[in-house]
Image (tube, rainbow, N blue to C red):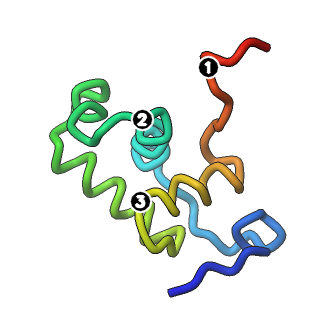
Amino acid sequence: MKTDTNRAIGRDPAFPALSDREIRCLQLVAEGMRSDEAASVLALSNNEVNQALIGAQEKLEASNLMHAVSLAMLIGMIDHADPYQPK
């Protein structure tokens, strides 16, 4: 399955809305956490985090998790600013 770039950058808002849990899990993965670490931070089971990540990947029609993170960043669903970079 190939993602349409126009849709990915928000010119065609055809992506279904991600749940808060999916967004939080993607954000933590974007920050470099593994799913077990994200589960600990969010007080969820590892299975719940993995299901949220799979759900986000499917909704974004991403080919893998990193693709889902990239798409979520492109469409502004998750923050991609480096917290360690001086402003």
Q: Residue at x 41, y 59 (%)?
A: 65
Distance between mark 2 and mark 3 Cα atoms: 12 Å
Q: How many C-alpha atoms fall within 10 Å of the one at disc 3: few (<14), some, or many (≥20)? A: some
Q: Residue at x 25, y 53 (%)?
A: 50
Residue lying farthest to the right in this orientation = 11
Residue 15, quarter of picture: bottom right
| Picture coordinates of residue 81, whole percent (x, y) | 68, 30
Residue 62 left/right relative to 49: right
Q: Residue at x 47, y 51 (%)?
A: 19
Front residue of this view, candidates 73 and 14: 73
The amino acid beneath tag 2 is: Gly
Q: Identify which amino acid the numbered label 1 is placed on.
A: Pro
Amino acid beneath label 3: Leu
Q: Which quadrant is the C terminus positioned in? A: top right
Q: Which mark is residue 2?
A: none
Label 3 vs label 1: CA separation? 21 Å
Image quadrant in which you'd find residue 17 = bottom right
Is 65 above or below relative to 42?
A: below
Q: Closer to the N terminus: mark 2 or mark 3?
A: 2
Whichever of callouts 3 and 1 sits on the residue coming sooner in the sequence is 3
Residue placed under numbered mark 2 in the picture: 32
User: Are the residues at dot 2 and dot 3 in contact (C-beta closer than 8 Å)?
Assistant: no
Whether label 2 touches label 1, CB < 8 Å: no
Q: Which residue is mark 1?
A: 83
Q: Which residue is mark 3?
A: 65
Q: Secondary structure at mark 2?
A: loop
